Amino acid sequence: MRRGSYHIADEPRPGALAQYAIDPMWAALALMFGGVWLAWPVFALNAFALGSATRRRDLALLAAGLACMVAFLATVEFLAGLGWMPEATYPYLRIALTALKLTFAFVLQISQSRAAELHRYFGGRLRVAWPLIPLGFAGQMGLFKVLTGYWLAVLS
């Protein structure tokens, strides 16, 4: 029997990016220390690197997360424009936005953890991606200087 003719659905199909597969915990930490601008591209790249059977769902989660954040911020801007949002609520809304970002990150981490363990089980190697943490810190400082308002809230 040819090798390509039989495939277990949960078994990862590593491709050319398999050498860059990381433990999804590092992508979640990248969100905490760097922000969405760093973590979500890492999650997307990792979905392909792991050869995950759920890579389409992971990409859909990333798109849904971005859409939810934009809708949340647009709603806040709309309500603030109408005068229905007192300025004292902004710090609490920032916490809600952070919780939204973390929720999507943790769902993605759990989804990719399954694929990462299968990748490791079938002989793949997961890289340790600790450089994402200082990169996140440095990038956040740059984002705070360049971006303001709406986009800073989405990407940080």
Image: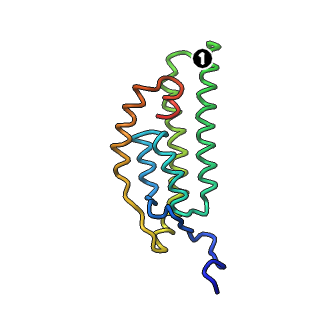
Number of residue marks: 1
Q: Is residue 6 above or below residue 110?
A: below
At numbered mark 1, what does the secondary structure look like: helix, strand or loop?
A: helix
* Crowd tier of the residue under label 1, counting other residues whose Cα lies within 10 Å: few below 14, some 14–19, many 20 or above: some
Q: Is residue 133 above or below residue 1?
A: above
Tell me: 15 left or right of 134: right
Q: Which of 42 and 70 lies nearest the eye of the viewer? A: 42
Could you say where residue 65 lies in the image, as x and y percent from the top left?
59, 41
Which corner quadrant holds the N terminus? bottom right
Could you say where residue 152 lies in the image, as x and y percent from the top left?
48, 29
Q: Is residue 80 above or below residue 26?
A: above
Q: Is residue 82 above or below residue 113?
A: above
Could you say where residue 155 lies in the image, as x and y percent from the top left?
50, 34
Residue occupying image coordinates x 60% and y 32%: 70
Q: Quadrant of residue 74?
A: top right
Tell me: 94 left or right of 132: right
Instruction: Kindly give the residue lying farthest to the bottom in the view shown.
Output: 1
Q: Quadrant of residue 111?
A: bottom right
Residue occupying image coordinates x 42% and y 31%: 143
Could you say where residue 94 lies in the image, as x and y percent from the top left?
49, 29
From the image, tell me which residue sits under label 1. Answer: 80
Three-letter amino acid code at the position of disc 1: Ala
For the rendered model, the colour scheme is: rainbow
Q: Which of 28 and 126 lies nearest the eye of the viewer? A: 126
Residue occupying image coordinates x 39% and y 60%: 127
Instruction: Kindly give the residue lying farthest to the front in the view shown.
Output: 16
Residue occupying image coordinates x 54% and y 57%: 47
Q: Which of 116 and 80 lies nearest the eye of the viewer? A: 116
